[in-house]
Amino acid sequence: MATITDVARVAGVSKNTVSRYLNNRGYISEKTRANIQDAIDLLHYQPNQIARSLFTKRTNIIGLVIPDVVQPFFATMTSKIEDELDRHGYKMILCNTMHSSSKERKYLDMLTANKVDGIIIGSHSVDINYSDIRAPIVALDRALSDDIPIVSADHKTGGHIAAQAFIKQHCKKVEQFVGYSKVRTPSVLRHKVFAEEMRDHGIQSFTYELKLNEFEFSSYLQIADDFLQKNPDVDGIFASDLIALAMQKKALELGRKIPEELLLFGYDGSFVYQIAYPSMPTIIQPYRELAQTIVSVLLKRINGEPLESMSYILPVRSSEEE
């Protein structure tokens, strides 16, 4: 196994210079940096992370806490965030709470005990005081606390774009499926805007509230079957992609014509809408830009740099624009 002495010898520098390079301390010319990195790559040198963290007071590890990695939005965001963290030299610990408040608490305790450099939180348990957590935090589409910055998509515009589709189709009775109301999330803005525009155009609009952390497709299929059987007069449904896909499957089984008799409009723009048949319009969230922004904000918090804002809102677009 290669040592720091081996790296110094191959690079033609001192051990102290290699150490400063590894810990990003002091000035080192670009040529010397390149020589050291070439030596590291050649020797497959692995720095002692424990010793390094003791010296730098950093672990270069970030925790990502989400409710369910199977849910398409979080699955896509996890991939994009991990990729962005890797680009900045960070490793990621994925904490999948499986909708459990107690499990989320255990994960947060574990992350702080292991002194991760920061935490990205996309879950929300109503009985946890996130301000008490001893680590830099950034929220992903969740309003955790006034002192925790949040990164989300422009849900107001998303709600408006979707509403225009139902107005254009001359729908008369629509239903939108919303998340658990006690969870504070910017996504409620899309539902508010959507309901207001339905009302302004004389379209009946109703709301179906899902249970806390209800993300399972099997549950959505049961909900879809029950809802469509009991509400044959509904001619429009606005919901997340996975729910809309479940509605499509059950509606087709019941002989409903889509979109002529039932307009389905999704939200998220994950891989789910791409497998819908017939094709289903959706609002596409800017996954890569969300990941880039949330990592950038978290790194600023870790480094003690000032933030331009406590709320970062990124633009969405309709799949019909493609």
Image (cartoon, rainbow, N blue to C red):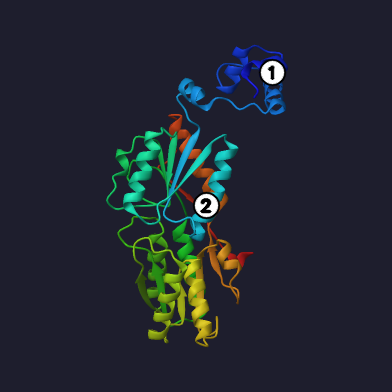
The image shows residue 18 at horizontal and vertical percentages of 62, 17
Tell me the kind of residue under disc 2.
Met
Image position of 51 with respect to 75: above or below: above
Q: Residue at x 65, y 22 (%)?
A: 2
Residue at which label 2 appears: 77
- Point out the tag, 2 or 1, that comes first from the N-terminus: 1
Image position of 40 with respect to 321: above or below: above
Q: Visible in this render: residue 168?
A: no
Tell me the kind of residue under disc 1.
Thr
Secondary element type, mark 2: helix
Picture disc at residue 32: 1
- Left or right: 218, with 41 as reference point: left
The image shows residue 164 at horizontal and vertical percentages of 50, 71
- Left or right: 138, with 22 as reference point: left
- Residue at the limit of the structure toward the left, as seen here: 127
Image position of 213 with respect to 80: above or below: below
The N terminus - image quarter = top right
Camera-nearest residue between 1 and 285: 1
- Left or right: 92, with 98 as reference point: right
- Residue at the limit of the structure toward the front, as seen here: 1
Task: Choose top left, top right, bottom left or bottom right for residue 210.
Answer: bottom left
